């Protein structure tokens, strides 16, 4: 079994990518975005964290979150978000024999990608990455047009201009 090493930093700010198990032609997250919002809110009530940036795409999500001072347990939060979301949906997905034996759903990839934010520049780059993602994936041509993102809140707060990154060209090197 691989030895996954995680950087534990109490009160850290983290970037995450969390994927569905079946990513091809899967729109589960946007179809059930309200369920996901409710689950995240409920987990935050029990295990607080601050959401700096978040985007929900059809088959994956990205976010930048900050844990409370002295807290390192982002793994518990993701375990609860993924399991609580899965419990809210009917069992319609294909499940491997291994998942069936373990009583697991076949919705999420078991692992996720995390990155500890190092400094302000790293923070800004990951916040931009979160918000440009719908454009990068060809879901919209302007960031403001994607509804499942904290971009709208950040525009209201004056962090981003409403017309920021109308297309992907020139932003963080995404010209593809």
Image (cartoon, rainbow, N blue to C red):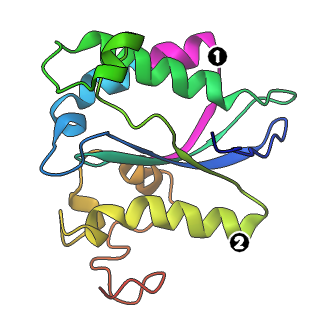
Q: Residues within 10 Å of mark 1 (few under 14, many from 20)?
A: some
Reply above or below: 77 against 172.
Answer: above
Q: Depth check: give the residue in front, 86 or 51.
A: 86
Q: Quadrant of the C terminus?
A: bottom left
Location of residue 11 in the rendering, given as x and y in whole percent from the top left corner:
81, 36
User: Which residue in the structure is indicated by mark 2?
Assistant: 121
Res. 55 visible in picture: no
Q: Residues within 10 Å of mark 2 (few under 14, many from 20)?
A: few
Highlighted magenta segment, given as a residue range: 41-55
Q: Depth check: give the residue in front, 7 or 104.
A: 104
Disc 1 from disc 2: Cα separation: 28 Å
Quadrant in the rendering for residue 163? bottom left
Reply above or below: 110 against 125.
Answer: above
Q: Is residue 72 left or right of residue 37?
A: right
User: Which residue in the structure is indicated by mark 1?
Assistant: 47
Location of residue 39 in the rendering, given as x and y in whole percent from the top left corner:
40, 18
Q: Quadrant of the N terminus?
A: top right
Location of residue 122 in the rendering, given as x and y in whole percent from the top left corner:
69, 67
Please tell me whether mark 2 sits on a helix, a strand or a loop.
helix
């Amino acid at each position: 079994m691989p030895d996954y090493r995680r950087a534990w930093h109490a009160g850290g700010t983290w970037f995450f990518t969390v994927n569905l198990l079946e990513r091809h032609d899967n729109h589960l997250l946007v179809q059930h975005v309200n369920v996901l919002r409710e689950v995240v809110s409920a987990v935050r009530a029990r295990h607080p964290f601050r959401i700096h940036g978040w985007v929900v795409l059809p088959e994956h999500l990205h976010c930048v979150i900050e844990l409370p001072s002295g807290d390192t347990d982002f793994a518990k939060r993701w375990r609860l978000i993924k399991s609580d979301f899965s419990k809210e949906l009917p069992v319609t997905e294909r499940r491997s024999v291994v998942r069936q034996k373990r009583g697991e759903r076949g919705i999420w990839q078991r692992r996720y990608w995390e990155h500890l934010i190092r400094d302000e520049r790293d923070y800004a780059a990951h916040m931009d990455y979160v918000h440009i993602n719908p454009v990068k994936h060809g879901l919209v041509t302007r960031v403001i047009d994607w509804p499942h993102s904290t971009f709208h809140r950040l525009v209201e707060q004056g962090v981003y201009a409403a017309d920021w990154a109308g297309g992907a060209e020139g932003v963080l090197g995404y010209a593809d």
